[in-house]
Image (spheres, grey):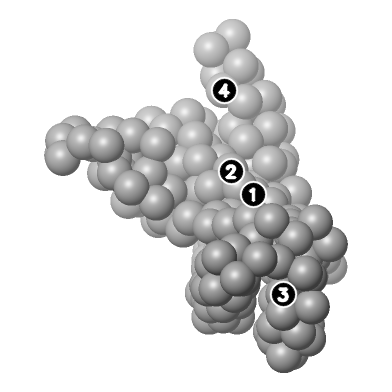
Amino acid sequence: MGCGSSSSTKTDSGKKPGKKDVEQLNIKETGIEDLDKMFDDASAPFNKAVDVKEAFDNAVEKFKELTGHTKDDSMKDVVLDMKKKFPQLKLEVVDGPKFVLTTGDGEGEDVAELAVKAVEAFQAISDLVSEIIELMKTAVESAMGLIEKSQQITDMVKNAGLSPIKLPRALKIAAYNITEFKKVPEIGKAFKQTIVNTVEEVKNTAEALKEEQ
């Protein structure tokens, strides 16, 4: 994937505009319909997981910004600070994992609006955590399944009836696509670790809240 500009402009989050932490798989077409469909189907769960992971990162950042914090502030600091505005604030972690944040009553219209937005943002984080877990499990299984079919894929290309000019190109693209799928397990581990760290951070925050009661 090429880059059309050498500009170093970045967003407030420190990323270049349109730049993701992890890119989707760059799958290329071989010109063999059945094989291209196989590649597309196998890459779909991972590409969806990349989008959901980005949405998760944005949801965490939005929650922190809503409460007057920066993306670098810990979840624990953010929630404990919220408790100053919402003395009845509670945070639970239930099976799933699912996070449940309740604020109770706050004083003033602005505070009430903040409560609604903060709870919605936190719910989005919880929903996306569960979605990433399921998508990455499927993505890794799909990638490994395709990698195991490497020889079968090579044979499909050789038996596709391509011309002597098109055959070498199709073989090269097929090999490249398989290499793309080899990235998935390692990225899957990184995504999983992010989720594990998030769940642990939320659990620690919930415990800290209980200690303050």
Q: Which residue is mark 1?
A: 52
Tag 2 secondary structure: helix
Residue at 60% x, 71% y: name it: 164
Distance from the alpha carbon under mark 1 to that under mark 2: 5 Å
Q: Identity of the amino acid at label 3?
A: Val
Q: Which residue is mark 4?
A: 114
Give the mark nearer the N terminus: 4 vs 2: 2
Distance from the alpha carbon under mark 1 to that under mark 4: 25 Å
Mark 4 residue crowding within 10 angstroms, few (<14) / some (14–19) / many (20+): some
Mark 1 residue crowding within 10 angstroms, few (<14) / some (14–19) / many (20+): some
Where is 7 relative to 141, above or below? Answer: above
Give the mark nearer the N terminus: 3 vs 2: 2
Q: Which disc is residue 55 wearing?
A: 2
Dots 4, 2 in contact, CB < 8 A = no
Where is 8 relative to 207, above or below? Answer: above
Mark 3 residue crowding within 10 angstroms, few (<14) / some (14–19) / many (20+): many
Where is 142 relative to 145, above or below? Answer: above
Tag 4 secondary structure: helix
Give the mark nearer the N terminus: 4 vs 3: 4
Please state the horizontal and vertical placement of residue 36, each as a whole percent of the image. 74, 59
Is residue 190 found left or right of 171 in the rendered image? left
